[in-house]
Image (cartoon, helix red, strand yellow):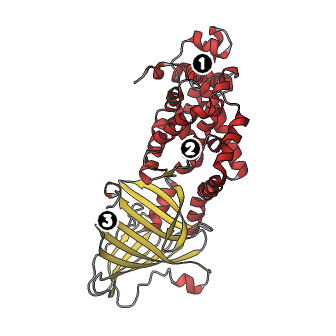
Amino acid sequence: VITDDPIRDLERQLVGAVPRTAGAPRQASRWRWALPAGAACVAVVAGLILWIGGDASAPSMAQAAYARLNPGGGIIELKYDSRFYDGGRLYQHARTEVWYSAGHEHTVATSIGPRSGRDRRFLEVVRTARQIRSYESGAGTITVQANCRVPHTTTGDPIAYFESLYRSHRISQRGTATFDGRRVSRLVAADAGQQFVFFVTAESGEPVAMTVRPLALIARGARFTGTVVRFLSYRRLPIDASSRAQLDMAPHSEARLIELGRSRCPQR
Amino acid sequence: MDDSEQRSDEELLDRTAVEPEAFGAFYRRHVANVLAFFYRRTSDSQLAFDLTAETFARALEHAGSFRAMAQPPGAWIYAIARNLLTDSYRRGRVADDARRRLALEPMTVTDLGFERVEAAADAASELGAVDLDEVLSREQAGAVRARVLEDRSYEQIAQQLSCSPQVARQRVSRGLRNLRRRWEKQP
């Protein structure tokens, strides 16, 4: 039974099941239904085990995903691909590389022309807990700002968004799905009129993808409007000179500092 | 609205065998609080709904024998819920025995469906659906629930809890005082 209203459908099923309980001893009832159910039960139970089994560890799956994204005392390198759709039409495509520790972060975002497929770097941000720097990154710059990252900036910072929702206990697990051919767990939240779905590997909670869609535009058969973020690579780097260098405040060559401001960003 | 909404839980459970809709009314009366009970403990709407479904399936199985029990139906449904939750943690999965015995069909819930589940749980929580059984003694929880949530008279509560009206009044009073202290302690 596929249902949009499980509370009412459960009531209907329970009321419909009353004749199967009334006046009948439980043991007799069990055999009465076990026998005709027969082979069908095997399939149903197998489905239930898959369906329910994954959920029994639901709280820990969100924790595992959070632990994966939280650097603790280390450094995380994450690369992800963001695609922005309007009614099924791709209108922006960006690729981001980010290195971050608890107090430092270095992000390089690259815009990819939806038609040309050409890359162009458009934003480089380096921040510490006290400072944030944004650099103009060459010709064709889209936007450069010296703003602090806002936790609820969905498309710009999927990691911060997930962390924010997790800390406010708004993430819940809703079964599993197949995403790009991989079996994944779905961590879901509704926030500010948007549906947020975070897909993580069912085994370890490693990030696989994220979608953000306006709730008002989710309907059966409707073309996709929203953002799809695919996590291309995820690594917890060893702490050494090379990984620390990724967090240096030094910009890439040719970059021009356009603004230097004070950051109020919380630590991760 | 039919008259079943006006009847007591005991009457609804008692009539279930001959009048299936009575259990529907009992379910409607308690489902949001049970959902909220599970949602607070699991932070997972799917898991909360799954546990709720099994709780009510168990309640339905035992509705006919409810009269023999010595606790109010509100506490009874929470007792089932608590036992199921403990059992589920222990086994690492949610039992589905009662649903299987009743031949209830497995449900695949859409995102919209889960929005509804969460909304119902949230609404129940916002209305102050405190888990009385968790914060008060069994006697006080039963008395407060009957008085405040079910709007019963002290005479009815006394009959239900097998005590005098004065003792019922005392239990309600002490229970409310304990709740007030607890809330005052919270930041």
Name the secondary structure under disc 3: loop
Name the secondary structure under disc 2: helix
Residue B181 at what x, y percent from top left? 59, 28
Res. B40 mark: 2
* Marks 1 and 3 on same chain: no
Residue at 58%, 12% (x, y): give it.
Answer: B156
Q: What distance separates the C-alpha of mark 1 from that of mark 3?
A: 56 Å
Residue A266 at what x, y percent from top left? 47, 62
Residue at 32%, 86% (x, y): give it.
Answer: A117
Residue B158 at what x, y percent from top left? 63, 12
Q: Are marks 1 and 2 in contact (CB under 8 Å)?
A: no
Report the front residue among A98 and B56.
B56
Q: Which residue is mark 3?
A: A223
Q: Tell me, yes or no, if residue B135 can be seen here.
A: no
In the picture, measured across the screen, residue B141 lies left or right of residue A106, that is right
Q: Which residue is mark 1?
A: B172
